[in-house]
Image (cartoon, rainbow, N blue to C red):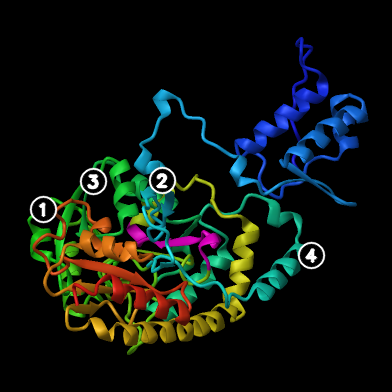
Amino acid sequence: MMDLAIQLTDAEGKCLYQQIYEYIKEEIRKGKLLVGEKLPSARFLAEYLQVARSTVDVAYGQLVAEGYVEARPCKGYFVSPAEDLFHLSVGKEEKISEKAAENLSILDDRGDKELLREERFPVKYDFSPHAISLKAFPFATWKKITKNILVDANSEMFALGDAQGDEALRETISRYLHSSRGVNCGPEQIIVGAGTDYLFMLLEKILGRHVPVAMEEPTYKRAYKVFRSFAYEIEAIPMDSSGMDVEKLRETKARVAYVMPSHQYPTGIVMPIGRRLELLKWANEEEERYLIEDDYDSEFRYKGKPIPSLQASDRKGKVIYMGTFSKSIAPAIRVGYMVLPLKLLSVYKESCGFYASTVSRIDQRILNEFIRDGYFERYLNKMRKIYRLKHDFLLGQLSAFEKEFVVSGENAGLHILLASRRKIPEGELLKAAAKEGVRLYGISDACMKKSGIEGTLFEGTVLLGYGALEEQEISYGISLLKKAWSHFL
């Protein structure tokens, strides 16, 4: 229930019930009172405002009559679902273009949420490469763990914890990383944070400002934007079929290279061991060179053995390893982690070790028990099976496109790529699909430069994600895509 901070005045011509009525109506129209939200009872509001109960009853009665509020017997008053009553009040200085006002939607970008994107056509099937399925999430288990923790909670849990994260969780993460990814680290090297943005912020304090950073082109756009906000000098390094071109990297002044070797976003490339060793050699050539390994979704691999992390091959403390539970568990978990080489760990403790942990200790304990007691492993195994079936089904549906398109990026992650053999412009492919209600994603959205993919093996490439779609939805979506691209096939 929402409290209402109504300021009643003695202004002429405005009786008290009218002021209450107009205040609530405007709050609803502005979206500050949401659909389904419960209003204070008439008695409570009358006592709070020091007015007669009948005054509030009249105001509520008028709101009910106009459809802003609905009265539910024995339950109270609730905001009605009356979208048609809402409108935008836009002044000249705030005016937006008619085209942009048609339909605006949030675009999720692996966590990098591009602000607002124009939509001219209704979306029937969204092949987002960033969405995941939560239908099989063990809500009952999570609830049980949470309940047990809160029942057993003591005052220590509500005290300020370790800045790096609770030691028990860091110990569990270190064991998990070693067994699943080959990462060599102790719990003292791990820093837990609420999402990668916070961890990137710590890195800026550790590595220093104005550091030249090399990034793959295309890349994870959110990391690029965060690094730019640090005034880092960004070097866009082209990619070949094995990942970042190390020879091009050597031509720059970069001190740090940001890479995703286990499953590069968005190209889906898995970096072979030879290229990994080349990157490590580059980092070892100078004292202050480092590699940032973003291992955001390596849990989902459907063919062959798991690919060890780049950090597993590091013998000289040159790799900063970063991971998250957003893909493997749920985006709302908002728990990421970073493994620092011992040399940088001492810098962290000196320069920013005083920053408090940004993850609730209760959430840390829930996550720790979820992983430690085997629930996480069982959930991962179930999701691998679910995603593998969707992955295989999608590949089967795309067989009709093989003559004109090259399929790549398969067997890992939650998206695949379709590249036009004739280099049909990405914009034409996306627009044709959109007309039929199919939303695809262009690889150019992940480029730092406008010309980032021109003349490369990724020209004319679009992304199709399948994580959040059911097989029937994939089938219908691909049938519409065939129709949309019929003149390309």
Give whichever of 26, 386 is nearer the camera: 26
Say which element carries label 1.
loop
The C terminus, quarter of image: bottom left
* Residue 248 falls left or right of residue 118: left
In this view of the protein, can residue 37 be seen by the observer?
Answer: yes
For the residues labelled 4 and 3, the Cα–Cα distance comes to 48 Å
Picture coordinates of residue 337 (x, y %)?
45, 62
Residue type at numbered disc 2? Glu
Q: Is residue 334 magenta?
A: yes
Say which element carries label 3.
loop
Residue marked by disc 4: 151
Q: Earlier in the sequence, mark 1 or mark 2?
A: 2
Say which element carries label 2.
loop
Residue marked by disc 1: 252
Residue displayed at 42% across by 51% down:
197
Q: Give the number of the mark in front: 3 or 2.
A: 2
The N terminus, quarter of image: top right
Classed neighbour count for the residue bearing mark 1: other residues with Cα under 10 Å, few (<14), some (14–19), many (≥20): some
Residue type at numbered disc 3? Val
Q: Is residue 479 above or below residue 103?
A: below
Residue marked by disc 2: 102
Classed neighbour count for the residue bearing mark 2: other residues with Cα under 10 Å, few (<14), some (14–19), many (≥20): few
